[in-house]
Image (cartoon, coloured by chain):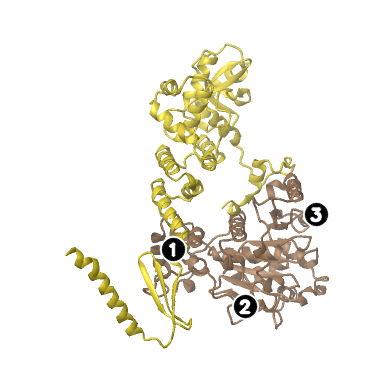
Chain colours: A yellow, B brown
Amino acid sequence: MSQRKQVKFSGLVDKGVIHPKAPDVPPIHSTTYTEVTPEAAQSSAPRTDAASTAIPGEVHLPPDQVIDLDLQFVDDSPFQSPNRSYDPESLDELGAALVAAGQREPIQVRRKSHRYELIAGHRRVRAARLRGLVRLKAVIVDMDDTQAELAVLTHNEGREDLTDYERAKAYRHAIDRGHGNQKEVAAMFATSTTNVSRCLSMLRLPQPIVDMLEKKPSLFGIAVTETLNQLLADYPEDQALVVQAVDRLNDGAPGTSIRTWFELMHKQRTRAALPANSRPKVVTDPSGRQLYTAKRDGRVITIRISAPDVDADSTLQTLLESLKLLAQGPGSAKS
Amino acid sequence: MHAEVLRSNHGVRLKLAKEFVGFTDTDKKFRELAREAIGDQLIMPGSGAYKTYKAHEIRQIRQKLMAEAIKGTQTSLPPVVNFRMSKGGTGKTTCSSNIGTCLAQFGHRVLIIDGDPQGSLSKQLGYDINQQLTHIGALLERVAKRKPIDIEEALVPVYPNGMLDLIPADITLANDSWMINTVGRESLFLRLMEAEADFFRRYDVVIIDSAPGTSLLTTVFMAASNIITAVVLPEPQSVLALEVLEANIEEINESVRRNGPRLGLHIIANRYRQTYKSHNEALERLGSKYAPYLNDTIIRDYAGFLRETDMDDYTKSVPVLESEPNSVGARDIIDVTKAIVKLYNIKISAPRQAEAA
């Protein structure tokens, strides 16, 4: 499959395969937005001055007030999961939404040594930077390190579109940072211990499957994880086939089809592994000439008459006779 | 006009047809739409085998789908896509023939002109050039000398229903001595298009495959286009040669296009191998210098392009999109073509009276 994936110039740059310098020719299709929508700009116009004249770090601005914050003073939170991935496509969509519909909710930041540190809004800040927006509406909150860490860790939990895999990573991160065992973390995220442990079991799936999830966190959730864990326990030697079954989800197969598909494939494989069944039996006459060949495929028996001079009708008659005898044998015994 | 259609047996299967039409719903709904637009979907009733979709059929489906949007649109002169590179062997001809067939298969009407005396494009599209033919040079000469032109006579239909027509070339195209004393020769192709406007309006796009190097004829073709499409290998010699082409463009912008719209540049990187360090280095150089002009899709090195032309019998040559539609090569061509449709604003016009009938 990977061979089929196209090679894009931008993809090579993103992956770091090539590092072109910024060209000095003017771009043909430049879409750089330097302003939020007019309405958004208007509504926050009076505050713009306040924000731009305020030196970051100064305590002139009351907390919990919405200001227009210059993004160059904003840093990522050190508490967010270090391997959190940002899907470029969804960032692009978010950026488009920011430009088209304006910003609905302000991002949250706290002061940190003459700069601002993000509490909530990591994706929005990235999307805005991609679109060339220089300011976003922000709320400054007053938090110490512990509060900030808790806020960053739990902030996304309520979001509807958060996938189970992303939740699992957040739980793992919280546990790793010493916020207690599964039970305590469950309380912290206001969810059940069962949910935490089921989510965490996603991270223990075989590496190829976790890699797929890393690429596409929405691939499947905890329900499918449970099926997978059962399959892996039942057929420990068939891990590769389980991985294949998951890979089908990439092509849009429904998660509910995994077990059926796996079992079908497994059956086919085991059948293929027993060639003795399908090897034809040959009947020859005393001189060694091939007369009949018989083959069984499942519950279908095929008999081929190889010699041209053998009469097919009489052969069938004989066969039927012996079948009748066979049928009478156990049948008569029963009655 | 050449009587025989070269490739009447072309077509793509359902999956690609859906992609080309831009249809995202179920297969069943697509077949229903297709049945309304072009008729029966089964090859033989009761056989269960579905048909392949030919270029003109996809056109009809798209026209049906976009009936409201394209109603009453004026047909103007088509955009000219000129494949051009100062260096030889970079894949201009391969790109022209494959992108040409792909555009036709998208449902656009394509006129493809072989501007190379080697005639390799004609061969690749399955035309045997060892016969009497009228090439583009002869047509331009008649324009210059104000003689009557019969452009239909030069035409070789590659796909039926005018979906892909070829003006072939042979070695006699190399003789451009008549052009030396021609006044205003740079605008010759534009003059041909204006003189034969009715003919050119039949098409949605004109593709010209230029010869390598820089000659009078290549300049004529360049001046006819608004954006030059350069095909470049990710190799040092090729990237350096692009600078020569850039100088050519600059020259035209300073002379013929002094007052008109300036000539743009569009670059396709071809025959790329990700494992070659030197390819990545050359690509990096290409990006550093020309990133905004670069087509984002890079065509990978793919042996299928070499299989296209039959060495013994030209008429058996098959473009990749037909012979290996699910291959890496076909995928790249499709993606590059999609970008070209956008860049050149290639459209589909409403069915004409004759077409609808």
Residue A196, numbered label = none
- Same chain shared by disc 2 and disc 3: yes
Left or right: B324 in relation to B172: left
Work out whether A16 lies above or below B147: above
Q: In the depicted view, which residue is nearer to us: B308 or A245?
A: A245
Q: Residue at x 39, y 86 (%)?
A: A310
Please, what is the three-letter code of the amino acid marked with disc 1? Lys
Left or right: B312 in relation to B239: left
Please, what is the three-letter code of the amino acid marked with disc 3? Ala
Residue identifier under label 2 = B152
Work out whether B46 lies above or below A53: below
Label 3: state its secondary structure: helix
Q: In the depicted view, which residue is nearer to us: B102 or B203?
A: B102
Residue identifier under label 1 = B64
Nearest to N terminus: mark 3 or mark 1: 1
CB under 8 Å between callouts 2 and 3? no
x then y, percent, for residue B355 = 48, 72
Nearest to N terminus: mark 2 or mark 3: 2
Work out whether A46 lies above or below A60: below
Residue identifier under label 3 = B247
Chain to which mark 1 belongs: B
CB under 8 Å between callouts 3 and 1? no
* In this view, the mark in front (2 or 1): 1
Residue A125 found in image quarter: top right
At label 2, counting other C-alpha atoms closer than 10 Å, the crowd grade (few under 14, some 14-19, many 20 or more) is few
